[in-house]
Amino acid sequence: MKRKIIVMLAMTLLSAILFVPLTKAQGEFNVYAWVDKVQYAPGDSGTLYITIRNDRASYVYVYNITIIYPWHAYVEDHWEGNETIEIKATVAEDGGVLNKECKFEVPSDGRAISSMIAPSQIGVYVDTEQLGMQTEIGSISIANPPVHMAVKDMNTWMTSLTVVIVVCTIILAIVVFLSTRRTRALPPPPPPRAKAE
């Protein structure tokens, strides 16, 4: 009986050791990205902060960081809205950190307009030797210009509204008048005449 318990305990421990995820055993490599303001207007300047943290048991060599802003486009004869920063640095093991700040300017043309359905995102791609490409998506909010509404033919609309209000008032007055009017009592029918013989 004791032997069965020992064998079962040994098998349980062995299976627990074998099924430990490898990512936890090796540690994690994380990329974080955020901006310095809650919202930007077209033409504003800002700063993108990037932090790389290595919790792995070995160092990670970073070649470069590529940033793609939401206003990334081909303008005339070149690309705008992207940036590649050459790092060529080692991020130390067990909690090593690499910080980078990148200045940007929100364009004042239509490329910077964001929608409520799909908020603007900044793509941060870190190219490493050991892990390949690591990606982080940061959010950026860009204030849209105000939308001005012009109502055409307002005088026709107001005239129609006035006519509808007058007609509804007349109908309501008729209904109230008829519902409050008392019915008159009809005089009793005359008694039947006697027939002449």
Image (cartoon, rainbow, N blue to C red):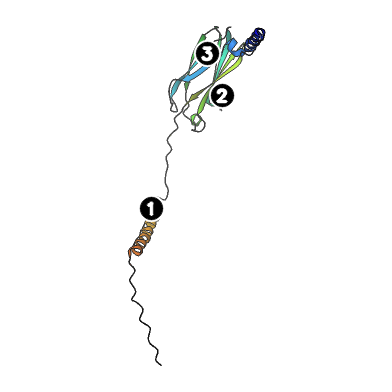
Side of 8 where 124 appears, left or right: left
- N-terminal of the two: label 3 or label 2? 3
Q: Are marks 1 and 3 in contact (CB under 8 Å)?
A: no
- N-terminal of the two: label 1 or label 2? 2
How many dots with numbers? Answer: 3
Q: Residues within 10 Å of mark 2 (few under 14, many from 20)?
A: few
From the image, state whether disc 3 or disc 2 is nearer to you.
3
Q: Residue at x 56, y 24 (%)?
A: 79
From the image, state whether disc 1 or disc 2 is nearer to you.
1
Q: Is residue 5 above or below residue 177?
A: above
From the image, state whether disc 1 or disc 3 is nearer to you.
3
Circle 1 sits on which residue? 158
Give the amino acid type for the residue marked by disc 1 in the picture.
Answer: Met
Circle 2 sits on which residue? 79
Which residue occupies the foreground of this view, 69 or 38? 38
Gap in angstroms between the C-alphas marked 1 and 2: 52 Å
Q: Residue at x 53, y 16 (%)?
A: 31
Gap in angstroms between the C-alphas marked 1 and 3: 63 Å
Q: Quadrant of residue 159?
A: bottom left
Circle 3 sits on which residue? 52
